[in-house]
Image: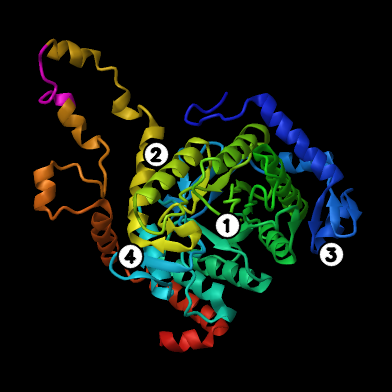
Amino acid sequence: MADPRFIRMQGRQELEEIHEASIKVLETVGVELQSEAALELFKSRGATLDGNRVKIPWALVEQAIESAPSSFVLHALDPEKSITIGEGQSRTHIEPSNGCIYAQSLETGRQKAVVSDLVNFVKLAQASPVCTINGGVPVEPCDIDPRTYFIRIFYETLKNTDKPIRSNMSTRQDMEHMFAMLEIAFGRKGFLEDHPAIYASINPLSPLAYNHESLDAIMTYAEYGQPVTVLSCALAGISAPVSLKGVCVMQNVEILSGLVFTQLVRPGSPFVYAPASAVPNLRTGEYVTGSPESNLINVANIQLARELYHLPTRTMAGLTDAKTADAQAGIETMQNLFQCMMGGASIINQCLGVLDSIMTNSYEKFILDQEMISRILTFMNGFEGAKGDLAEEVIQEVGPRGTFLYHPSTFASCRDAWRPCVSTWDNYEKWEEAGSPDAAQNATAVYKEMLANAPDTLLDPSVEEELTAFVGRIIPDLALKMK
């Protein structure tokens, strides 16, 4: 039975057609893998090799779908904030934006991001009532030594969040260092052996290829039992067919091949299916994020994963091509959020602050996005709790021409109604007396208050000392600064 919270864009027959076309491509065209280890593993399990290309039989795909869990718990440093991802989760999970080059605010304008911006966005995600996952690289600091980039970012993340964590792929050594750091924070060596607690988003090279770094990241995370997210971001008419259903087929092939590899490395390893393709501006060949057609593709693939494969899903949802927090940003962001959340994505990312086709992370838009997400989550909750009371007795008590304003039921529930955090509901005169602020100006005050209330660290002093010592052995310059 379909979940009534989610829209269904495709019928069962259409989903089967996409699936069958995908299997045909996997078996006859295959996927190029730039890794001898990956190729040998596929070959040992019955796949056909043609140079660096592997052709994957349906039997391997079927085994992988059966092997991968339909849900898993992603553990947080605060156990109360651990979450279920996949079947049985109670709400859409939200994570911050990732990979933005610039930080932007009304006061400072658009500037190359630095470490303090990264820390600020991690703190905002920690304080946000809608954000259930933290981490990644919300902005890419330009003032970090590239040789120690991911270790420094992960150190700052662990200090400033106790929510579940996503990360980014790096070298195997960096990833293993990050796993060791996370176990220090959890207080138990070997914790990750049976506790999924960090996942990485890994991208194929569209069309139909994986580079060595991506395959090595999949192997590393799967070997440690940590969730792998394979995110296909193909461009219709450029790195994928111009046909929207053709993109559905191709990105399904890319994601399923990643799923099979994950399960060959470690059967039962958690896997998240992540379609995120787009319809670009074919006049210029540029990537755009605001097209309503893009999520016709992605929602169809989410539905495919949810209904046929029973896999957790993730997609980029708060995207806009707007350069500032204006009407275009609101239109495109709400369009994409609504499509992806109502489409049934388990996790959405690129949805808190992102502007300019993922180039910029905006402080004000982080707060505006938070409100938009809250609106949709409230809508998806439906008539929960007291909102579902048919109130027959109350209607009888008040009767014709009465008022419900002073009825005890109104007093009991009046504070439960949803309210915005930045939108203005005051009348015109009160709004004018307050200085006629727009929503973005209200958002400035909100994000500043959130940052002012954020602690310098969330770690226990002894844990922070051990973590700092570990990082200091990897980054001696950082250790000197900490003394």
Q: Could you say which is closer to the camera, residue 323 or residue 209?
A: 323
Residue 407, magenta (yes or no): yes
Distance, label 3 to label 2, CA atoms, is 45 Å
Q: Which residue is mark 2?
A: 377
Amino acid type indicated by mark 4: Ser
Type of residue at label 3?
Glu
Q: Which residue is mark 4?
A: 105
Q: Which of the labelled discs sits on residue 36, or is there none? A: 3
| Label 2, label 1: how far apart the Cα atoms are | 32 Å
Q: Which residue is mark 1?
A: 286
- Disc 1 marks which amino acid? Glu
Q: Secondary structure at mark 3?
A: helix
Circle 2 Cα neighbour tier, 10 Å, few/some/many (<14 / 14–19 / ≥20): some
> Which residues are the magenta region?
401-409
Real-space Cα separation, disc 4 to disc 1, in angstroms: 25 Å
236 part of magenta stretch: no
Question: Hey, which quadrant is residue 303 in on the image?
Answer: top right
When the figure is inspected, residue 91 is found, relative to residue 446, above or below; the finding is: above
Label 4 neighbour load within 10 Å: few <14, some 14-19, many 20+: some
Q: Earlier in the sequence, mark 2 or mark 1?
A: 1
Q: Earlier in the sequence, mark 4 or mark 1?
A: 4
Q: Do the numbered discs 2 and 1 sit on residues whose CB atoms are within 8 Å?
A: no
Q: Earlier in the sequence, mark 3 or mark 1?
A: 3
Residue 99 percent location from the top left of the image? 52, 64
Identify the element where label 4 is drawn: strand
Is 449 left, or right, of 435 in this rendering? right
Image position, residue 192 (x, y; %): 60, 60
In the foreground, 308 or 412: 308
The residues bearing labels 3 and 1 have C-alpha atoms spaced at a distance of: 34 Å
Upstream in the sequence, badge 4 or badge 3?
Answer: 3
Give the amino acid type for the residue marked by disc 2 in the picture. Answer: Leu
